[in-house]
Image: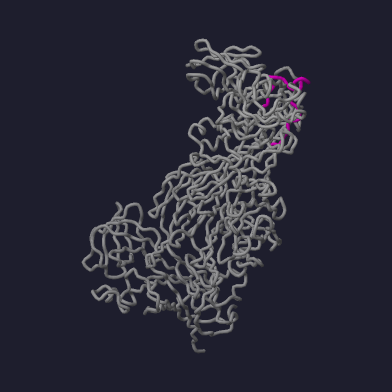
């Protein structure tokens, strides 16, 4: 029978199927370090060189931001420049521990990154690291300034016989011009009531008697009197004494004495705490506070409408950040509230309380979809909600000296109850001094010797510095302290209690006669004490609204610690049951009163539109069963694909109010979150059924006809998740999956999938994470803690791995060999030396010792002596599936084998064969120089002609003359029922470009065995 020639011109990639005879002719059993490109040819993968090795720390992931590389290590962020040089980013502490893989998303020109300590943010590739979101506002205290401390020009905007409400929030404008606002804090209400008094008249002059009224000459009062209309109106006062003042009316009243009520405008002083993290933040100078005020109610008996409007925005001063206390005096007239910015949480007119701007939670993944950030698989901070229900001192529930303790982890903080002043700011009734001893008179102040106080303002002549002082002696209605300097005169001062010498104190106001006032004052004082304590592991907030029952509070962890917050109430002042003043009851045992931490693995927290750092607690989307984690999320063009342990979900919608999840496929279990990647508006991931692909409407398996067998062998391995990662490379149209090979417990293979040809190959460049970075170049975070960079210069050197400096010491007279020095590595056959963009290939290497090597070249070289660059080769191995010519039952003679390339892309290749009797034949070495000669006009002055030897670094993009690689099949492999060609190409700077293979074959007998 005559020989026939069979050609295979289309290669289908790996087909590792049980039936190796039922495969397309171009199927492969091995195809390492190669890709099956869009035209179904076999091409070498691009090479990689070491780009960066960190001096310390463990690389966790790599991100592209502003076309620059940002590396996340276990304890820091770094910018890595185009030369591979890193610089540490300053700012907030970075922690990425254990198996956590940081993820990132870009929004509003910022980069947001998941870490153990929450979402961290960059505003530029080399900016300081900051925390995402704005801390909530904390406690707020407000009181009217005593009139005696004002002048007629600064009386204030709050009319008499009214109530008004205040709220505070914090914000900042980041360097990308994004305005960020936090959650508003307490609502504080001030009442400016009518004052009851007696009067008498002499003609049109009316004298009002009101003990210690505090008014001053020139002030206006508004008078109401049901029986004397002539008294009703607004009058300017004169002839002021301690207990009386006069005003003049239009006509003499009759009778000439009686009772009346008067009211007057007042000025409010607000005081609030700055959170510890804001005061210590890298960008603390960028923060500001906003103060909002309601309109004034119709009377002091009416609750103000919650129509908060902005009256003040101001950056924090250095002293305010240092003391963590802001004091603000409100002198904004109501006219300026017209058209002022409304508080965004106002009910009815704005978003409502449920949409307060909470900070992002701890999460495992982040994505941006339709201008909302989805924070996936979330964990909230530990939170303890409780309410004060009694501050009854008279009933012996509470006593001065009782205390509350708060514990989290190894930190325990104590807060001491004090009757009287406590930690409220008050004004002394009088103050005086003798030498350096200051005496303060205040009825039933409740403070004791050893307590510390903070003096915020002293009035008189000369100076008494603001600051903290320790009480030296005390009596029931007075106390003393020593000052370093004293004023010339001292009339009174503003002060508040701070500590009992060791622990913070808080005011406890007896609620036996005024329940609501007692609860409000005591609860807000406890909140203030906690927030002013810089060592407290928690923040506290008073949350009773205008129409709520008083006394509601919560305590929230400052961090995402897994340790619970524990509380206890201890009687130490003569009461018996202080813990019964709370709901739930606080016992004296920590473990009885613990916080909860919402761990919501099936939940997405969704930001407001175009406000990625504002994440209202109401904006939560539950996806599937709670006992099934969200592993990853990917934003497609019109929907979100969410991968969970239990299957694949899709989320549709366009706002946080209408996002809806639906199941795409709940028949598979998803593995290895890092394996999932987005490419071509599709998500590729690893599941129990193999590598799968999800679109917005369906899920399909794509590894079935390529790599199912080796994948199935590792799916039960406990190391699979930690040792598996994937990346999509849109420009190259490939997906790379690094994972375990069978019988391995560490990442040992990379599967490469071309989304156009559906062909699988393998690479040996295992990685932990990968990124398509600047210039569409692939970067790998390798398993040995390095970053490798894909070569992408669009020349032949793209098909090399590492490069090293060498010294060419001498060159033989025939220009076919040389002596070189190579320090720190060993040159090998297939490596190349490049000089002036001309390639010299190594055909043989001899180790002469002492880092000196003799090298032979494939062709005459143009090298000169001196310092040069050597580029390393890497192996590409190809083993074709059994080729049987359509007749598995006939023995055949395979006489010849040929390889055809698109251009001179192979200078040296090793070829062997397997068949039904031998796993491998002897190796046949094929050298281009043996076919085309060792010279060629390509090295002559004419340059790199098509008919010369192509040793330049430029790639060709059209078909070029290239000798076929033709060999005879070795004797012991030539006769068989099938044959498998095995190729090994290890020559640097060669793309390979195999377009076809062919056999010369003849079936010659029917009997194939005895």
Residue 244 on the magenta span = no
Residue 924 can be seen in this image: yes
Answer left or right for 238 relative to 866.
right
Q: Is residue 363 above or below residue 428?
A: below
Along the viewing direction, whichever of 721 and 390 lies nearer the viewer: 390
Q: Spot the residue most to the left.
A: 813
Answer left or right for 391 relative to 4.
right
Residue 387 on the magenta span = yes
Which residue is painted at 40% across and 60% down in the image? 801
On the image, which quarter does residue 278 sit in? top right
Which residue is painted at 45% across and 42% down in the image? 90
On the image, which quarter does residue 197 sit in? top right
Q: In the rendering, at what x and y percent does residue 301 appear? A: 74, 34
Q: Is residue 558 above or below residue 19?
A: above
Answer left or right for 440 relative to 595.
left
Magenta span: predominant SS is loop
Q: Spot the residue most to the top.
A: 434
Along the viewing direction, whichever of 456 and 931 lies nearer the viewer: 456
Q: In the rendering, at what x and y percent does residue 116 appear? A: 57, 44
Along the viewing direction, whichever of 846 and 137 lies nearer the viewer: 137
Q: Is residue 426 above or below residue 765?
A: above
Answer left or right for 771 relative to 593.
left
Along the viewing direction, whichever of 357 and 717 lies nearer the viewer: 357
Residue 421 can be seen in this image: no
Q: In the rendering, at what x and y percent does residue 398 appear? A: 73, 22
Which residue is painted at 62% across and 72% down in the image? 19
Which portion, as a residue range, is magenta? 384-404
């Amino acid at each position: 029978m005559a020989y026939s020639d069979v050609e295979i011109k289309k290669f289908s990639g790996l087909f590792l199927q049980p039936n190796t005879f039922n495969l397309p002719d171009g199927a492969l059993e091995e195809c390492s370090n190669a890709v099956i490109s869009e035209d179904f040819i076999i091409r070498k993968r691009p090479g990689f060189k070491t780009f960066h090795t960190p001096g310390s720390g463990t690389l966790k992931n790599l991100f592209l931001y502003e076309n620059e590389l940002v590396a996340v290590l276990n304890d820091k962020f770094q910018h890595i420049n185009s030369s591979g040089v890193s610089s540490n980013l300053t700012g907030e502490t970075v922690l990425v521990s254990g198996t956590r893989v940081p993820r990132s998303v870009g929004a509003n020109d910022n980069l947001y990154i998941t870490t153990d300590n929450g979402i961290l943010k960059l505003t530029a590739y080399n900016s300081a690291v900051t925390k995402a979101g704005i801390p909530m506002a904390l406690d707020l205290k407000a009181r009217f300034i005593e009139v005696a401390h004002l002048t007629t020009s600064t009386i204030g905007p709050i009319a008499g016989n009214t109530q008004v409400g205040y709220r505070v929030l914090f914000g900042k404008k980041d360097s990308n011009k994004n305005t960020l606002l936090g959650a508003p804090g307490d609502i504080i209400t001030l009442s400016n009531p009518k004052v009851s008094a007696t009067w008498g008249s002499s003609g049109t002059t009316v004298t009002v008697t009101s003990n210690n009224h505090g008014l001053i000459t020139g002030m206006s009062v508004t008078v109401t009197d049901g029986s004397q209309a002539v008294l009703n109106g607004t009058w300017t006062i004169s002839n002021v004494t301690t207990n009386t003042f006069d005003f003049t009316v239009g006509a003499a009243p009759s009778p000439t004495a009686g009772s009346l009520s008067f009211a007057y405008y007042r000025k409010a002083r607000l005081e609030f705490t700055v959170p510890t993290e804001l005061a210590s933040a890298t960008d603390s100078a960028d923060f500001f506070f906003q103060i909002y005020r309601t309109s004034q109610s119709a009377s002091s008996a009416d609750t103000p409408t919650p129509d908060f409007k902005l009256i003040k925005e101001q950056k924090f001063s250095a002293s305010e950040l240092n003391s963590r206390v802001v004091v603000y005096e409100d002198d904004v007239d109501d006219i300026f509230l017209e058209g002022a910015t409304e508080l965004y949480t106002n009910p009815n007119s704005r978003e409502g309380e449920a949409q307060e701007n909470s900070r992002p939670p701890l999460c495992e993944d982040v994505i941006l979809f339709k201008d909302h950030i989805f924070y996936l698989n979330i964990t909230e901070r530990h939170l303890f909600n409780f309410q004060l229900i009694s501050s009854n001192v008279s009933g012996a529930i509470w006593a001065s000296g009782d205390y509350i303790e708060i514990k989290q982890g190894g930190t325990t903080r104590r807060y001491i109850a004090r009757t009287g002043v406590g930690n409220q700011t008050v004004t002394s009734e009088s103050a005086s001094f003798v030498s350096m001893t200051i005496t303060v008179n205040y009825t039933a102040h409740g403070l004791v010797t050893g307590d510390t106080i903070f003096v915020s303002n002293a009035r008189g002549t000369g100076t008494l510095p603001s600051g903290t002082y320790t009480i030296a002696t005390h009596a029931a209605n007075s106390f003393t302290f020593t000052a370093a300097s004293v004023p010339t005169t001292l009339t009174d001062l503003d002060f508040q209690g701070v500590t009992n010498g060791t622990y913070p104190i808080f005011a406890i106001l007896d609620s036996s006669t005024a329940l609501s006032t007692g609860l409000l004052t005591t609860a807000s004082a406890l909140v203030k004490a906690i927030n002013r304590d810089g060592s407290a592991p928690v923040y506290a907030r008073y949350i009773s609204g205008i129409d709520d029952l008083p006394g509601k509070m919560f305590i929230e962890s400052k961090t995402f610690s897994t340790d619970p917050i524990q509380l206890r109430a201890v009687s130490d002042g003569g009461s018996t049951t202080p813990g019964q003043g709370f709901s739930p009851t606080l016992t004296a045992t920590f473990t009885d009163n613990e916080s909860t931490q919402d761990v919501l693995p099936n939940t997405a927290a969704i930001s407001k539109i175009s406000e990625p750092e504002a994440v209202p607690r109401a904006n939560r989307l539950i996806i599937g069963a709670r006992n099934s984690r969200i592993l990853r999320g990917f934003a497609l063009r019109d929907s979100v694909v969410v991968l969970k342990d239990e299957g694949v979900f899709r989320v549709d919608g366009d706002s946080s109010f209408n996002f809806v999840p639906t199941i795409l496929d709940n028949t598979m279990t998803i593995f290895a979150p890092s394996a999932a990647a987005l490419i071509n508006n599709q998500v590729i991931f690893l599941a129990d059924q193999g590598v799968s692909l999800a679109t917005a409407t369906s899920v399909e398996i794509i590894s079935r006809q390529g790599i199912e067998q080796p994948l199935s062998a590792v799916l039960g391995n406990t190391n699979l998740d930690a040792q598996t990662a994937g990346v999509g490379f849109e420009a190259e149209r490939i997906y790379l999956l690094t994972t375990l090979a069978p019988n391995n417990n560490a990442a040992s293979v990379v599967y490469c999938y071309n989304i156009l040809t559906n062909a699988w190959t393998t690479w040996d460049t295992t990685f932990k994470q990968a990124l398509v970075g600047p210039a569409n170049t692939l970067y790998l975070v390798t398993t040995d803690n390095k970053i490798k960079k894909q070569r992408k210069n669009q020349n032949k050197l793209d098909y090399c791995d590492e490069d090293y400096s060498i010294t060419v010491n001498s060159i033989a007279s025939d220009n076919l060999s040389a002596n070189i020095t190579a320090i720190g590595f060993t040159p090998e056959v297939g490596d190349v030396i490049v000089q002036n963009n001309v390639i010299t290939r190594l055909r043989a290497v001899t180790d002469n010792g002492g880092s000196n090597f003799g090298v032979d070249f494939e062709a005459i070289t143009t090298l000169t002596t001196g310092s040069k660059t050597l580029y390393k080769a890497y192996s590409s191995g190809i083993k074709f599936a059994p080729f049987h010519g359509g007749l598995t039952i006939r023995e055949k003679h395979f006489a010849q084998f040929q390889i055809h390339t698109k251009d001179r892309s192979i200078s040296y290749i090793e070829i062997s064969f397997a068949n039904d009797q031998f796993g491998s034949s002897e190796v046949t070495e094929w050298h281009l120089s043996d076919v085309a000669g060792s010279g060629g006009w390509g090295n002559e002055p004419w340059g790199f002609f098509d008919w010369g030897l192509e040793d330049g670094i430029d790639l060709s993009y059209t078909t070029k003359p290239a000798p076929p690689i033709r060999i005879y099949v070795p004797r012991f492999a030539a006769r068989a029922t099938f044959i498998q060609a095995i190729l090994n190409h290890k020559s640097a700077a060669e793309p390979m470009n195999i377009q076809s293979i062919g056999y010369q074959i003849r079936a010659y007998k029917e009997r194939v065995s005895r």
